[in-house]
């Protein structure tokens, strides 16, 4: 019974249910900030003290690595005209639930431009010594997605074909949110 309770699907569903408010706040805050200036946030250390900030401009992507307490982080956020207080709240919220990465992607389906937000979470649960680290990847779509009877994300154009992102099958949480378990956080 313990093995059944520790499957990735149960942990992920439970994690999302237990932390839905924080995860949704991360998504909404990031979406608001991203609409002002495209960027992504990543924690690059195990203790969630070092944040990597990828800021996209018209011609380049600038990558910065800071300790969360480094005053240069504030200077960089101000330089790129990101709301400093809101971005720091987002960073703190990400730390609180061990969220390793948040990013937005655009894609085309049936010739229509759409977007999704990726959120990666590092589980705090017990990790066997000889197994690879696993991450829970959540995707937030801007519109409802099709799923099969087993709750797997389907390709919209061919309703029998599974849609894989980075080779991973995603499972339904609700109409616009799905998840997978991966050995890579991106």
Image (tube, rainbow, N blue to C red):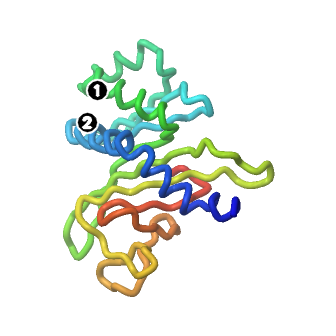
Q: Nearer the viewer, residue 141 or 6?
A: 6
Q: Position of residue 57 (x, y in %)?
A: 28, 38
Q: Check disc 1: other Cα within 10 Å, few if <14, some if 14-19, many if 20+.
A: some
Query: Which quarter of the figure has residue 30?
Result: top left
Q: Is residue 146 left or right of residue 181?
A: left
Q: Position of residue 2 (x, y in %)?
A: 70, 59
SS assignment at label 2: helix
Q: Is residue 141 left or right of residue 13?
A: left
Q: Position of residue 92 (x, y in %)?
A: 42, 27
Q: Nearer the viewer, residue 172 or 65?
A: 172
| For discs 1 and 2, the disc positioned in front in the rendered view | 1
In the image, residue 21 above or below residue 11: above
Q: Residue at x 30, y 70 (%)?
A: 145
Query: Which quarter of the figure has residue 173?
Result: bottom left
SS assignment at label 1: helix
Q: Check disc 2: other Cα within 10 Å, few if <14, some if 14-19, many if 20+.
A: some
Q: Residue at x 22, y 39 (%)?
A: 32
Q: CA distance from mark 1 to mark 2?
A: 8 Å
Q: Earlier in the sequence, mark 1 or mark 2?
A: 2
Judged from this view, the residue extending furthest toward the front is: 1
Mark linked to residue 86? 1
- The reply to whether discs 1 and 2 touch (Cβ–Cβ < 8 Å) is yes
Query: Which quarter of the figure has residue 74?
Result: top left
Q: Position of residue 33 (x, y in %)?
A: 25, 36
Q: Residue at x 57, y 58 (%)?
A: 182
Mark linked to residue 171? none
Which residue corresponds to mark 2?
33
Q: Is residue 126 left or right of residue 47?
A: right
Q: Nearer the viewer, residue 138 or 156?
A: 138
Q: Residue at x 29, y 82 (%)?
A: 157
Which quadrant would the N terminus be assigned to in this image?
Answer: bottom right
């Amino acid at each position: 019974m313990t093995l059944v309770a520790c499957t990735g699907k149960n942990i992920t569903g439970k994690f999302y249910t237990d932390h839905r408010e924080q995860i949704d706040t991360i998504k909404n805050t990031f979406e608001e900030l991203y609409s002002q200036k495209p960027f992504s946030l990543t924690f690059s250390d195990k203790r969630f003290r070092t944040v990597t900030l990828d800021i996209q401009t018209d011609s380049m992507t600038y990558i910065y690595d800071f300790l969360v307490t480094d005053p240069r982080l504030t200077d960089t956020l101000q330089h790129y005209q990101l709301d400093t207080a809101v971005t720091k709240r987002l960073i703190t919220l990400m730390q609180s639930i061990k969220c390793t990465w948040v990013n937005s992607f655009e894609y085309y389906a049936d010739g229509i431009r759409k977007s999704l937000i990726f959120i990666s979470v590092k589980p705090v649960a017990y990790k066997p010594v000889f197994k690879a680290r696993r991450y829970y990847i959540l995707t937030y779509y801007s519109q409802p997605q099709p799923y099969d009877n087993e709750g797997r994300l389907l390709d919209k154009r061919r309703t029998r074909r599974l849609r894989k992102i980075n080779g991973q099958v995603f499972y339904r949480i609700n109409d616009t949110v799905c998840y997978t378990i991966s050995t890579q956080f991106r």
